[in-house]
Image (cartoon, rainbow, N blue to C red):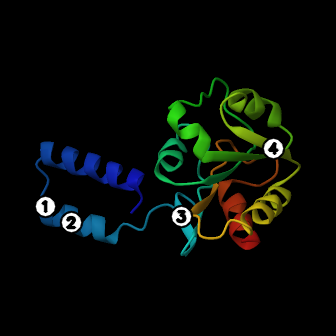
Amino acid sequence: LTKTNKENLLFVLEISRKLKLKKNLLIKAVQNFKGLKYRQQIIFKKKYLTIINDSKSTSFSSSIGLLKANDNIYWLLGGIHKKGDKLNLPKKYFNNIKAFIYGKNNKFFNKKLKGKIDYKNFNNVKDALKKIFKIIKNEKFINKTILFSPCAASFDSFKNFEDRGFYFNKLI
């Protein structure tokens, strides 16, 4: 379980306690819960590298938990942003993240990250991912995370977030 999922589970447990739900039913439901596909899905984990597919992420707030919980993050983001979306990430996390923005709508993301998080722009996910792998191949013995958490709708390049998530997994 990721830290964010643990927080969500604690929330569910507290609600169920207040509603006086039967514990055995709750335990059974939690044990059978599979989670959403492409939501904080760890698709690769080796000694010094974790790759997370969070294609379900369509706003900055949906990515905050993962940005706080991981080390040396190479963050892939882009797509059709939500109007008024804000990156409410405490400053102490900024140096831990390098952003790789893909797609046509990069101006919005550039504006939100400027002066906070180092970023580079790319035409597409594949080109951004190639650059990340080029960078990290020289970073041996350092824990790093490739985080595909777009913070945007996918309709500029994909049918939906599932199509986008499937494509990312295929690239990996």
Residue 91's x, y, as percent?
A: 54, 31
Q: Quadrant of residue 78?
A: top right
Mark 4 is surrounded, within 10 Å at the Cα level, by few (under 14), some (14 to 19) or many (20 or more) other residues, namely: some
Camera-near label (3 vs 4) is 4
Q: Quadrant of residue 127?
A: bottom right
Helix, strand or loop for disc 2 = helix
Helix, strand or loop for disc 3 = strand
Marks 2/4: CA distance?
45 Å
Camera-near label (1 vs 4) is 4
Mark 2 is surrounded, within 10 Å at the Cα level, by few (under 14), some (14 to 19) or many (20 or more) other residues, namely: few
Q: Which residue is mark 4?
A: 120
Q: Which residue is mark 1?
A: 23
Q: Which residue is mark 3?
A: 41
Sequence-first disc among 3 and 4 = 3
Per the rendering, the mark at residue 27 is 2
* Kind of residue at disc 3: Gln
Q: Classify the position of the N terminus by image quarter.
A: bottom left
Sequence-first disc among 2 and 4 = 2
Q: How many marks?
A: 4
2 and 1 marks in contact (CB < 8 Å) = yes
In depth, the one of 45 and 32 nearer the eye is: 45
Sequence-first disc among 1 and 4 = 1
Residue 64's x, y, as percent?
A: 51, 42
Mark 1 is surrounded, within 10 Å at the Cα level, by few (under 14), some (14 to 19) or many (20 or more) other residues, namely: few
